[in-house]
Image (cartoon, helix red, strand yellow):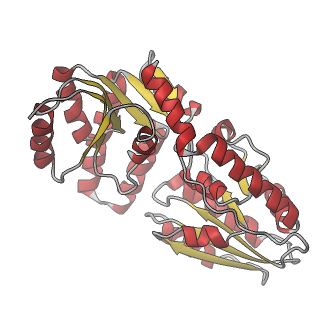
Amino acid sequence: MKKYNLDILIIAVRDPRERYRFISEPLSRTRLNFEILKDKGPFLTFIFYSIKYFRFRGKIKNIIIFGGSIKNFFWYLMNLFIGANLIMREGGDPLLVYKSYIKGLKRNGRLLLIIKAYINYILYIFLIRNVDEFIIVNESIYPSLRNIRKKNTHYVVIPPLKEKKLKKVLLNKNSQQIKIMTITNFSIFEKYLCLKKILTFFANSKIEEFQIEVNILGGGSYLKDLENFSDCLLYNKYFKINIHGFLNDIDVFLSKADIFFYVSELDSTPNAILEAMSFGLPILLNNYLPFKNIINTEGVLYFNLENKNDFIKKLYKLSSDAKLRKKMGTDNLTNIKKNYSTNSIAKKLESYFLN
């Protein structure tokens, strides 16, 4: 078999969210020659398949890995013989996310998963210290990387999104039934705490002009805690709280929502926010610097997470004004097409790898 050269090899280890697509999909619209090495199952199977793959390839200029794991560590060792430029794509604060994840595992007493998570964490830090470059989704991640490794080269590339059809919002009257929603990961303790705070805001709200239906999506070890906490609160008759857990088809909820809200003091670039923007939804976000780094648009209202009145005031403002919701949603969809579409990210990646 004739060997051929590659500009980029993407190592796609097992990941339910298939985050390698955030790089591979825009790369498919560039002049770059790339391939994806997909996970083939257990570790030993992965090793044999990787070695077999490498035997029939020519020179590889760049290898992209995603996060830290024993399989990515194996490709770090492979690269000692290959000599490619090893790039780690990082989507969150490496220290905070892993520590919070391990904290959730400890709470459930899942010993084998805890041991595996600690091993992956050690390898994760090792890889951060030893890869050649980073692709990060938000500039706010850089200080954490710098704390682990003083000198590093990084390039900011946000996740691409496909544009959805903008929902039609009536302009001649304000609806008396408002649907708002959020999506989050309840494996992360900090996100659970933020949602608890928002639920107390709903329970203490004096809004009575609208019927507000709140849909909360997402799974994780703290989901049951949130359900129990919500059951203990007394909401007025104008609020209906639905906690759905993990669902595959979130598009159904996004297509029916009027407002999307998100609260976190841990994320860097939540894909859920960008998805909501691509549906033409107005967004409510807590006043958190990493969010402002990526979302500078008139389609977002920021609120103080420590101030119940500020959140309720912004919620009321959006709920009572259909024209404002339409204007903000249109602005968000325009922003997605201009800055977050697959084509716009493809141009950035092509510039990065060819220059």
Please name whichever residue, 57 or 282, is drawn nearer the observer in this view of the structure: 57
What residue occupies the far bottom of the structure in this picture? 237
Please name whichever residue, 20 or 145, is drawn nearer the observer in this view of the structure: 20
Question: Position of 315 compared to 120: left or right?
Answer: right
What residue is rendered at 28% in x and 46% in y?
A: 13
Q: How many marks?
A: 0
Residue 326 to residue 239: above or below: above
Residue 177 to residue 59: above or below: below
x, y (%) of residue 343? 54, 41
Examine the rendering and report whether any part of residue 10 can be seen: no
Residue 339 to residue 273: above or below: above
Examine the rendering and report whether any part of residue 265 can be seen: yes
What residue occupies the far top of the structure in this picture? 151
Location of residue 205 (image quadrant): bottom right
What residue is rendered at 84% in x and 79% in y?
A: 176
What residue is rendered at 32% in x and 35% in y?
A: 34
x, y (%) of residue 97? 46, 44
Question: Position of 85 compared to 169: left or right?
Answer: left
Please name whichever residue, 303 or 329, is drawn nearer the observer in this view of the structure: 329
x, y (%) of residue 189? 51, 55
